[in-house]
Amino acid sequence: MTVQIITEKLDLLCEDRAVPSNVKKMMKEALISLKDETEEVSVRVNTVISILDDASNDPNLTQYSRTEIWSIASLLETV
């Protein structure tokens, strides 16, 4: 259930016009990593958290988007 919510939140960020294109690219990369069934869940989660950490440091990111990224990272830590 939680992975589905995380996937939906990442999709919303990818569609948000306020999110810079390089951050959208990172969000798409995170989605691909999260959906990759060949890796263990813990490896996928750690990969996505790392991607989100890099994305949240983008200086062109709005505060709302940064907060959403942190929210997603917090959800991932519970998986």
Image (tube, rainbow, N blue to C red):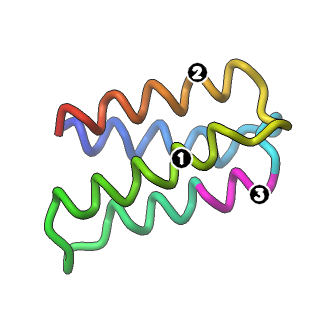
> What are the residue bounds of the magenta stretch?
21-26
- The secondary structure that most of the magenta stretch takes on is helix
Q: Position of residue 70 (x, y in %)?
A: 49, 28
Task: Write the residue at 26% across / 44% down.
Answer: 3
Q: Which residue is pictured at 28% across the width and 62% down the height?
A: 44
Q: Position of residue 12 (x, y in %)?
A: 58, 39
Q: Is residue 66 magenta?
A: no
Reply above or below: 10 against 30. above
The residue mark sitting in front, 3 or 1, is: 3
The mark found on residue 22 in the picture is: 3
Q: Is residue 57 left or right of residue 69?
A: right
Q: Which residue is mark 2?
A: 67
- Which kind of residue does numbered mark 3 sit on? Asn
Alpha carbons under labels 3 and 1: distance apart: 15 Å
Could you give the CA–CA distance between mark 1 and mark 2, rounded to whole angstroms?
15 Å
Q: Where's residue 19, x and y in %? A: 77, 40
Asked whether, in this view, residue 10 is left or right of residue 58, the answer is left
